[in-house]
Amino acid sequence: MRLEVDLLASDHPAPLRAPSTGDRREQRTVLVVAADADVRRHVLECLRDRTDFHVLEADTIAMAKRLAALERPELLIVDAPDAAILDAIVDVRSVVMGDDVPPHAMRDGRIITLARPFGGRDLESLVDRLMS
């Protein structure tokens, strides 16, 4: 405890660590959009070992729009009930989880569907395909 107090009272700033491989600057931003917290958790679990991704999550379309404006995601992973976000965030490749995808969204080839149930390897395979 004494050491912590001495450090806090010190006039010397703590040294910043050097950037390393996998820092956010080198990561690709992925936005997960799902109102269902369990769905978001499952996607996060599937991608947890992917250090090349900076994964953000949104539980509403409004929040997804705000995050997309700030963070400029390179990929959307969207639960089918929240597919309306595909009309708001255009020109971003997307994985839609579920069987019901708006037909107009499939025309431009930027969207791939992923049927449930799916595992981590299934999702990673589609993500890698879209990101390459």
Image: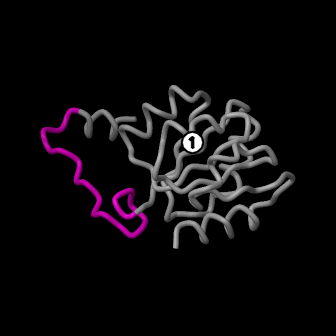
In the displayed structure, does residue 39 sit left or right of residue 49? Answer: right
Going 73% across and 34% down the picture, which residue do you hit? 81
Q: Quadrant of the N terminus?
A: top left
* Residue under label 1: 86
Magenta segment includes 83: no
Near mark 1 (Cα within 10 A), the count class, few <14, some 14-19 or many ≥20, is many
Going 74% across and 49% down the picture, which residue do you hit? 97
Q: Position of residue 31 (x, y in %)?
A: 53, 46
Q: In the rendered structure, which segment of residues is drawn in magenta?
A: 9-26
Q: Residue furthest left?
A: 11
Q: Nearer the viewer, residue 28 or 77?
A: 77
Q: How is the image coloured?
A: one colour
Going 39% across and 70% down the picture, which residue do you hit? 21
Q: Position of residue 51 (x, y in %)?
A: 52, 63
- Give the structural element (helix, strand or loop) at label 1: helix
Going 52% across and 54% down the picture, which residue do you hit? 75
Predominant secondary structure in magenta?
Answer: loop
